[in-house]
Image (spheres, rainbow, N blue to C red):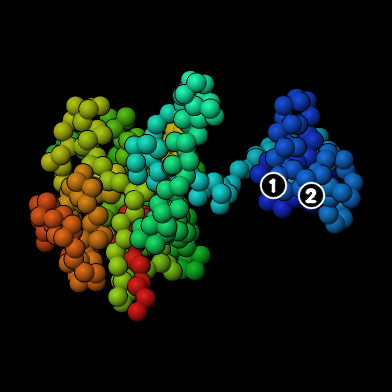
Amino acid sequence: GIKKWTLRRGNIRHPIRATTPHYCREASVVENQLKVARMSCKDYGFEYDHNNTLGEEKEIYLYPGDVLYFPSGMWHKVESVEAGVSMNVSLMGTTWASLVCNSLQHLLLGHDERWREVVTFRATSVGSNPSGGDDGVRRLQTLLGELPEIIQKFTNECGGAKSLMPPALCYPQQRIGEVDEENENWIEDEQGTGGDADSDVDDAAEESICNYGDENDSDTTKNEQVDEDDRSTWGILVSLDDFVGPPGWSFDEPSNASLLKNPLASLIPMAEVTTPVTGSDLRTDDPKKYILNVNYAGNEMCESHVRVVLETTDHIDLMDWYIECESKVIDAGKLFCQVKGIVKQTKEKKEFLENVSDKKYAGSVPPSALFYYGYFSWNERRS
């Protein structure tokens, strides 16, 4: 069929909720729309007039096969010129405020156990405290007083924006089945981006995982016998040994640069996840698999901004060393800088070196995939 759309801009830039009254059936919905809209426009209302609109009306006709995208906060009216079937999809993008606040929650939850306490209001007796029950207020004030130092350290010493937005989010890889238009080549495999994919991509990725191994090897291996639940745990599978980043991205070490470990990133051996579920011991598998999660504790479901499974034959000892550093709360990036002479050694860091098993790995440049997916980043130091 054919549809006629009439559109006009609203006067709120970057609204976080719809600002037109097409959900007026429930008072609670209207209340939410109004209170959020009036955060940035104090006199906003649902009247379709010059106070709540900008510019002129635009008319657009959609024919079979057409797709229209329009930003949130636009006044719109839809009329059916011919009978037909259409589908509407609402998209909710992540705001800078959400990205920072969710990441800050992750940082605070891992920083100090006090931030993980459940909020309580412990009332004091009136006779002992003239101001009444303010224990909770005083505790919160103490935590807020420490917040600027925590944020400053994260910004200056822990990657800051680079840790929140690793290259995998800024330079996404091409996916299976896409055509490289410049070279007119078909993309046969995928390094993965940590994001969602359509059903065709999921099927292809799952097939490549199921068929993992030497096609000429007639012997049945454990990997070929992994059940459906185990495969679903793998997700996006990336070779750490053969990783090649997308065009435009480079992990080359800048001159006089320090190595920064992302405090929002963690590694888990795949065996620690699959063994309790399947009973299969994958600790001796070659290649060995590791799950990398980045920025995951800022939402209720602990969903990661980046999640990828890294497999390696060449870097098993190095990856196990990084995991050992995590378990002992040792910053592998700072140890790298001290071994390389980029920063002066301190007594504390000398003790850290004594506590790790293989000190030779402290000076190893990490594999490029760990930079792309956000476990490490380079920070060029000023002279």
Q: Tag 2's secondary structure?
A: strand
Residue 166 picture location, percent across and down: 41, 57
Mark 1 touching mark 2, by CB under 8 A? yes
Residue receiving disc 1 = 15
Mark 2 nearby-residue class (10 Å; few <14, some 14–19, many ≥20): many
Horizontal arrangement in the rendering, residue 116 relative to residue 61 (left or right) = left
Q: Tag 1's secondary structure?
A: loop
Relative to the observer, which residue lies in front, 126 or 268? 126
> Furthest residue to the bottom?
383
Residue 42 picture location, percent across and down: 78, 45
Q: Is residue 340 visible?
A: yes
Residue 10 is marked as: 2
The residue drawn where x is 34% and y is 41% is 112
Residue 14 picture location, percent across and down: 68, 51
The residue type indicated by label 2 comes to Gly
Residue 2 picture location, percent across and down: 80, 42
Count of labels shown?
A: 2
Relative to the observer, which residue lies in front, 148 or 88? 148
Q: Is residue 306 visible?
A: no
The residue drawn where x is 40% and y is 38% is 115
Looking at the image, residue 351 lies above or below residue 86: below
C-alpha distance separating marks 1 and 2? 9 Å
Looking at the image, residue 195 lies above or below residue 82: below
Horizontal arrangement in the rendering, residue 71 relative to residue 197 (left or right) = right
* Quadrant housing residue 162: bottom left
| Badge 1 or badge 2: first in the primary sequence | 2
* Quadrant housing residue 106: top left
Mark 1 nearby-residue class (10 Å; few <14, some 14–19, many ≥20): some
